Amino acid sequence: MAAIKTTKQEKVLNKGPKIYIGPSVNHGLLTKYTVYKNGLPKSLDEHLEKCPQLKRMFVDVDKMTEFENEVNDKTSAMHVFFNAVKEYFKGVK
């Protein structure tokens, strides 16, 4: 049986607890400040593929404040990613 390859980004997302700092969306699909201890749920796979910026919204718990400050800085890339995620989910039912 062939091994399934894991991308570098997936390894990072699955290493240690992550907190979601993106917008709360789709009636509980994602809620801001939710901590994921054992990797991300499979229900997000399709969204992670269709909206690559979503991956940036999951950060190490100990880095939350740093990333939250970046999201609130309108000149930062994280702010752009946050808004891209928000726009993406407007079109998802």
Image (tube, helix red, strand yellow):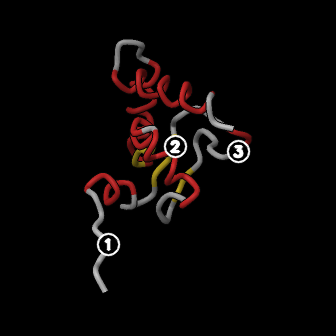
- Residue that carries the numbered disc 3 in the rendered image: 28
Residue 10 to residue 91: above or below? below
Q: Which image quarter: residue 25?
A: top right
Disc 2: which residue: 20
- Check disc 1 and report the residue beneath it: 4
Q: Nearer the viewer, mark 3 or mark 1?
A: 1
Nearest to the observer: residue 84 or residue 71? 84
Q: Position of residue 80 (x, y in %)?
A: 41, 21
Report helix, strand or loop for mark 3: helix
Foreground mark, 2 or 3? Answer: 3
Residue at horizontal 54%, vertical 61%? 42
Disc 2 residue type (three-letter): Tyr
Residue that protrudes farthest toward the front in the picture: 1
x and y, in percent, of residue 18 in the image: 46, 52
Residue contact at pointers 2 and 3, CB within 8 angstroms: no
Residue 55's x, y, as percent?
41, 43
In the displayed orientation, state which residue is furthest to the bottom: 1
Q: Earlier in the sequence, mark 3 or mark 1?
A: 1
What is the crowding at mark 2: few (fewer than 14 residues within 10 Å), some, or many (at least 20)?
A: many
**Residue 1 percent coordinates (x, y):** 31, 86
